[in-house]
Each structure stands twice: as structure tokens, then as C-alpha cells.
Amino acid sequence: MYFLSGLTNGSLYFKMTAWVGATESAASTVVGPVTIGATTGANHVSGTVTIPGTATGPMMGRRGISDGGSTYFTASRSPVSPQSYSIAGVTSGSYGVFCRH
């Protein structure tokens, strides 16, 4: 998982490559548009994530609508366990939650 910060609001397109030693892979197909910016849904999602062991590094919680139409992110620069999260502006739908720390 890779997190790209410092993006400005708007629609962006991405493609990725990977490195194995000194060899770069072919680029992926283009993904997008990915809309960066404030959300406008009427719902609020919140909860608590408990991590077994010691929480280190950036922690990212991802909530995604089950049909793949929308994904919302929140991050904590100083993770603790348990870690609360809160996301406003979520559209109606069925969501799955995972946490990568």
C-alpha cells in the first residue's frame, strides 16, 4: 500500500510501476479519474480500531463503498491503540472497513 500526500483538490489519473532490484516493471493501465477534495455525502462514519502489539508509523483507515464507487480515507500521524476515526461526508451505501498500520 502506498500513500501519496500533498495532493490538491481536483480529478487526477494514476499509473504505477514497481521496481525489483534495478529492473522497473511496465506501467499499469491508467486509473481514474480519482477525485481529491471535500466530500459531500450526508452520512458520518466513526469507530475505533484496536491493534494487537505496538502501533508504529502512519495508520490509515480505509472505508470503501461495496460497489467500488467511492473510497474515503483518514490517517493518524501518531497512532495509538485503540485508535478512533471519524469521516464526514460519506455517501449512502454498504461499507467495508480495513486498517493498515
Image (cartoon, grey):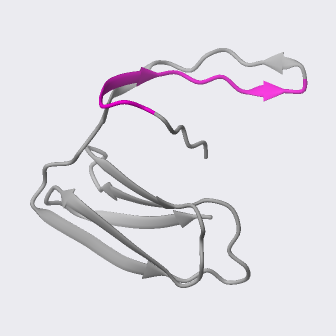
For residue 66, side relative to residue 26 (left or right): left
Residue 73 position in % (x across, y down): 40, 54
Residue 53 position in % (x across, y down): 73, 83
Say which quadrant the C terminus sits in: bottom right
For residue 84, side relative to residue 70 (left or right): right
> Which residue sits at x=27%, y=49%?
67
* Quadrant position of residue 79: bottom right
The foreground one among 79 and 26 is 79
Magenta region, residue range? 7-21
Residue extending farthest to the left is 42
Q: Relative to residue 100, is residue 53 depicted above or below? A: below
Residue 36 sits inside the magenta stretch: no
Residue 72 position in % (x across, y down): 34, 53
Q: Relative to residue 49, is residue 45 depicted above or below? A: above
Q: Relative to residue 88, is residue 80 depicted above or below? A: below
The foreground one among 36 and 17 is 36
Residue 14 sits inside the magenta stretch: yes
